[in-house]
Amino acid sequence: MSPSTVNGLPAHVLFVHFVVVLVPLTALALVVCAIWPHLARRLGVLPPVLALVTLVSVPLTTQAGEWLEKHVDNSSLIERHAELGDGLLPWALGLFVLSSALWWAGRRTAPDKGDTSGPAVRLTSAPVRIAAVVLSLVVATGAVVDVYRIGDSGAKAAWHDGFSKTAQSQGN
């Protein structure tokens, strides 16, 4: 269960910043690791850990958003934002699963010449690398586009009719 407020502010408006930063960062790390396996080995466990933090932050932000939704006037813009927000978790899970798979595959070594236990899964084979890159690009693009759409709908819900296009004069 996530907290509902932080220092008097709805927690959702704070948590959302983690998601807006972590999802694109995780997506970028995933694609980079898929394209350059040697870099994935150098980064080690960092990409899956980053993806795990991202995965955990999504439901926390969603739960805080559900609390906030109950404490603001209902509107179609807020409903749309909530509907879109509910669709991010599968993308975050995809980022985590693929990041973990790339990390696991990257740390596997080729079997010794005398080892007859079977071939190791290696990112150096062309079909495996192509599949990893394509899957990573699809999931990363989907996650980033979804975050953009969710953020855009949230901004519209929060700021619709909430500001003036002309500056207000301040009585001095």
Image (spheres, rainbow, N blue to C red):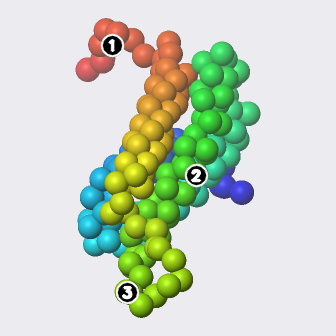
In this rendering, the label closer to the viewer, 1 or 2: 2
Q: Callout 2: 10 Å neighbours few (<14), some, many (20+)?
A: some
* Amino acid, disc 1: Gln
Question: Disc 2 to disc 3, how far (Cα)?
Answer: 37 Å
In this rendering, the label closer to the viewer, 2 or 3: 3
Near-viewer residue (4 or 144):
144
Secondary structure of the residue carrying numbered label 3 = loop
Q: Earlier in the sequence, mark 1 or mark 2?
A: 2
Residue 71 is drawn in which quadrant?
top right
Which of the numbered marks, if any, corresponds to residue 168?
1
What percent of the width, then of the height, locates residue 10?
59, 43
Secondary structure of the residue carrying numbered label 1 = loop
What percent of the width, then of the height, locates residue 149?
48, 27
3 and 1 marks in contact (CB < 8 Å): no
Question: Disc 3 to disc 1, how far (Cα)?
Answer: 77 Å
* Amino acid, disc 3: Lys
Secondary structure of the residue carrying numbered label 2 = helix
1 and 2 marks in contact (CB < 8 Å): no
Q: What residue is shown with label 2? A: 93
* Amino acid, disc 2: Leu
Q: Residue at x 50, y 16 (%)?
A: 160
Which of the numbered marks, if any, corresponds to residue 50?
none
What percent of the width, then of the height, locates residue 144?
43, 38
Q: What residue is shown with label 3? A: 113
In the image, farthest residue toward the top: 166
